[in-house]
Image (cartoon, rainbow, N blue to C red):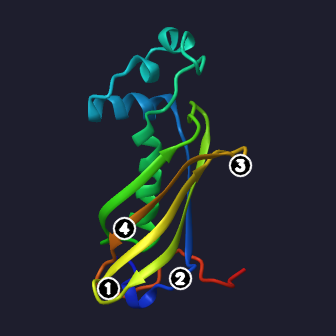
Amino acid sequence: MVGMSIDGLEIGQKAVIVKTITAADIQQFAVLTGDGNPLHTDGDFAKESRFGEPIAQGMLSASVISACLGSRLPGPGTVYLSQDLKFLRPVKIGDTVIARIEVVELNREKNRVRLKTTLHNQRGEQVIEGSALVIPPAGSRRMHSERPGDP
């Protein structure tokens, strides 16, 4: 399976992916990355923090954006070059996060795509904002994205 090449992309094209963050996700991310900050992994410690409960690692939350890029738009075969992130709110256990990406710039000469990247929680609150620069795959198959004007 191959994602969309730059020739299959248009300014304004969008994609979305949804994930509910679980305590197991946070624990597994801590093991995989070594980020065992007790703010994420220790309920008693986190209870005394400004958040009052454990929160997801910022990069765990941001990884949902990466999943959207790699599976939806441009899709499989996409190479991540850079990602700017601004963390606006914490993501807590049980939050359902919605990653939205939108094509905002196409550089056909260099085969580069800039995307607006955002993450919202189930209450519609924005938790992350940013932008990504990627190299789309060489293939040209249409994936699960919305084109401007589609219902």
Amino acid of disc 4: Leu
Other residues around mark 2 within 10 Å, as few (<14) / some (14–19) / many (≥20): some
Q: Where is residue 31 in the image (x, y as percent from the top left)?
A: 29, 29
Foreground pick, 32 / 35? 35
Query: Which label was assigned to residue 139?
Result: 1
Name the residue: 53% across, 38% down.
21
Q: Position of residue 54 (x, y in %)?
A: 52, 22
Other residues around mark 1 within 10 Å, as few (<14) / some (14–19) / many (≥20): some
Mark 4 or 3: the one toward you: 4
Spatial separation of the CA atoms under disc 2 and disc 4: 14 Å
Closer to the chain start, of discs 3 and 1, is 3
Closer to the chain start, of discs 3 and 2, is 2
Closer to the chain start, of discs 4 and 3, is 3
Mark 3 or 1: the one toward you: 3
Name the residue: 57% across, 31% down.
92
Spatial separation of the CA atoms under disc 1 and disc 2: 18 Å
Name the residue: 58% across, 79% down.
12
| Residue for badge 2 | 11
| Residue for badge 3 | 124
Spatial separation of the CA atoms under disc 4 and disc 3: 25 Å
Query: Which label was assigned to residue 133?
Result: 4
